């Protein structure tokens, strides 16, 4: 399952005025974007995430600064460092995620396939592990 999660390059258009990257539903990311939110001013040492989603697909971008994301599918884990605004991490459903090691001034942009639904969350690691059995 964790093999479905991957870094996807958005591409970068550069000229003397600066850089531009863009995202469109169902092109580089294979879901319709129904919700966008972002994390910022995360205090030093704080962690975000600490949950999984039953159905939600996400695409996460470090639009400024950097942070690490640890993914776990119940069997194996992998850590990604996001630090390029022209790349993002696709996370499929049923993957536990922990986001940490935020640099000062970092901004974490999240594109989601569904609007917020508390029923889609699995908020404890033991519940996540039990849910998979």
Image: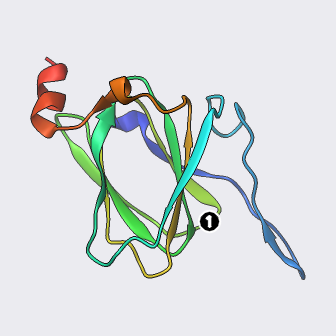
Where does residue 44 sit, x and y in percent of width and height? 31, 78
Residue 94 visible to the viewer: no
- Please say which color scheme the image uses: rainbow
Where does residue 119 sit, x and y in percent of width and height? 34, 23
Residue 67: quarter of image: bottom left
Q: Residues within 10 Å of mark 1 (few under 14, many from 20)?
A: many
**Is label 1 in a helix, a strand or a loop?**
loop
Residue 125: quarter of image: top left
Identify the residue at image location x=28%, y=62%: 47
Looking at the picture, does residue 117 appear above or below residue 111? above
Looking at the picture, does residue 92 appear above or below residue 16? above
**Position of the N terminus by quadrant:** top left
Identify the residue at image location x=47%, y=45%: 6
Along the viewing direction, whichever of 93 and 122 lies nearer the viewer: 122
Q: Spot the residue most to the right.
A: 16
Where does residue 38 sit, x and y in percent of width and height? 54, 56
Where does residue 98 sit, x and y in percent of width and height? 29, 53
**Position of the C terminus by quadrant:** top left
Q: Is residue 34 left or right of residue 127?
A: right
Looking at the picture, does residue 125 appear above or below residue 133? below
Q: Spot the residue most to the top.
A: 133
Quickly name the residue at label 1: 85
Along the viewing direction, whichever of 83 and 121 lies nearer the viewer: 121
Residue 111 visible to the viewer: yes
Q: Is residue 62 left or right of residue 42?
A: right
Identify the residue at image location x=65%, y=62%: 86
Tell how many labels. Answer: 1
Looking at the picture, does residue 69 appear above or below residue 67? above
């Amino acid at each position: 399952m964790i093999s479905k999660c991957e870094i996807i390059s958005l591409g970068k258009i550069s000229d003397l005025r600066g850089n531009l990257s863009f995202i469109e539903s169902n092109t580089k990311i294979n879901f319709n974007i129904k919700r966008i939110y972002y994390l910022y001013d995360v205090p030093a040492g704080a962690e975000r995430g600490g949950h999984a989603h039953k159905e939600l697909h996400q695409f996460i971008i470090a639009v400024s600064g950097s942070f690490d994301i640890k993914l776990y599918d119940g069997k194996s884990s992998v850590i990604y460092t996001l630090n390029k605004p022209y790349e993002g991490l696709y996370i499929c459903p049923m993957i536990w995620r922990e986001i940490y090691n935020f640099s000062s001034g970092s901004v974490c942009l999240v594109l989601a396939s569904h609007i917020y639904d508390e029923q889609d969350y699995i908020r404890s690691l033991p519940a996540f592990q039990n849910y998979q059995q």
